[in-house]
Image (spheres, grey):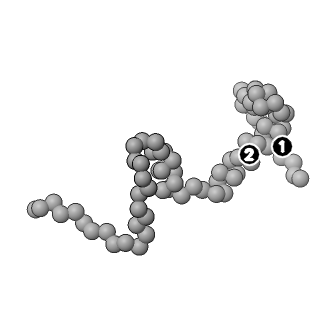
Amino acid sequence: MSQVVVRNLENGVKVGLKQRALLHGWSMEEEARQILRKAVLADSSPVPLGSRIAARFAGCGIAEDLPELHGQASEGMDFGA
């Protein structure tokens, strides 16, 4: 395992980290590990845009899945000009 030293950390951040650690019932060091782990894992496996959109609008009234349109040509709209 590696070590990381963080210098020049604002006092408010340190206090907040300590409060989060107390809330979760572990040390400040473990809280920092959890935060860093979560941030790195979130960046390494991005959620596809469609999945993010679906999650955002879940429970908003659409009762069935929308069809996938992979490889289908789109047609322009006719405005009757």
Query: Tag 1: Cα neighbours inside 10 Å, few (<14), some, or many (≥20)?
Result: few
Question: Looking at the rendered structure, which numbered label has been put on residue 35?
Answer: none
Q: Is residue 40 above or below residue 14?
A: below
Q: Residues within 10 Å of mark 2 (few under 14, many from 20)?
A: few
In the rendered structure, the answer to whether residue 4 lies left or right of residue 78 reads: right
Three-letter code for the amino acid on which mark 1 is drawn = Val
Q: x%, y% of residue 53? A: 47, 50
The amino acid at mark 2 is: Leu
Asked if one can make out residue 11 in the rendered structure from this viewpoint, the answer is no
Instruction: Name the spot of residue 49 as percent of width and height, x first.
Output: 50, 56
Q: Which residue is mark 2?
A: 36
Determine the residue positioned at 57% across, 55% down.
47
**Above or below — where is 30 with respect to 65?**
above
In this picture, residue 25 sits left or right of residue 78: right
Q: Nearer the viewer, residue 79 or 10?
A: 79
Compute the Cα span from label 2 to label 1: 13 Å
Give me the residue at 72% from left, 28% from top.
16
- Report the side of 21 relative to 39 (left or right): right
Residue 12 seen in render? yes
Numbered mark located on residue 5 in the image = 1
- Number of the front mark, 2 or 1: 2
Quadrant assignment, res 61: top left
Secondary structure type for disc 2: helix
